[in-house]
Image: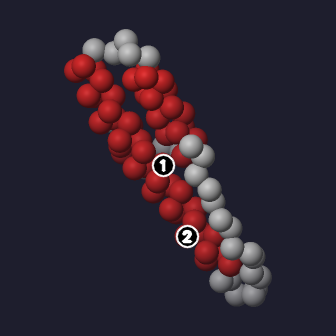
Amino acid sequence: MEAKDPKLSFETALTKLETIVESMESGEVPLAELLAKFEDGNKLLKLCEARLKEAELKIEQLKKSKDGVTFAQFEAGREG
């Protein structure tokens, strides 16, 4: 599956994940296909989480940069 592709961007993975969720919620997907979509969605979710974690680490590194520039702590809320 493309979710393993290290070049797949966060935005592309998120769009694919949203498409999978919409098709699953439609109720028109056969069970076998539903299970495959669930597995693909799970892989995409993990990829998105990894990309977010990478971004968080980069922000932390920037905060500790040699320039001494620091930023206020960013509190991310989950939409839900």
Q: Secondary structure at mark 2?
A: helix
Residue 74 in the image: state x and y as whole percent.
68, 67
Instruction: Name which of mark 2 and mark 1 comes first in the sequence.
Output: 1
Q: Residue furthest top?
A: 28
Query: Which residue position holds label 2?
Result: 57
Using residue 32 as the reference point, say whether residue 69 is left or right of it.
right
Residue 7 in the image: state x and y as whole percent.
48, 47
Query: Which residue position holds label 1?
Result: 48
- Looking at the image, residue 46 lies above or below residue 17: below
Residue 54 in the image: state x and y as whole percent.
52, 63
Q: Nearer the viewer, residue 2 or 71?
A: 71
- The amino acid marked with disc number 2 is Leu
Q: Nearer the viewer, residue 40 or 66?
A: 40
Q: Name the quadrant containing residue 15.
A: top right
- Image quadrant where one finds the N terminus: top left
Which label was assigned to residue 27? Answer: none
Measured Cα–Cα span from mark 2 to mark 1: 14 Å
Using residue 77 as the reference point, say whether residue 25 is left or right of it.
left
Residue 77 in the image: state x and y as whole percent.
62, 56
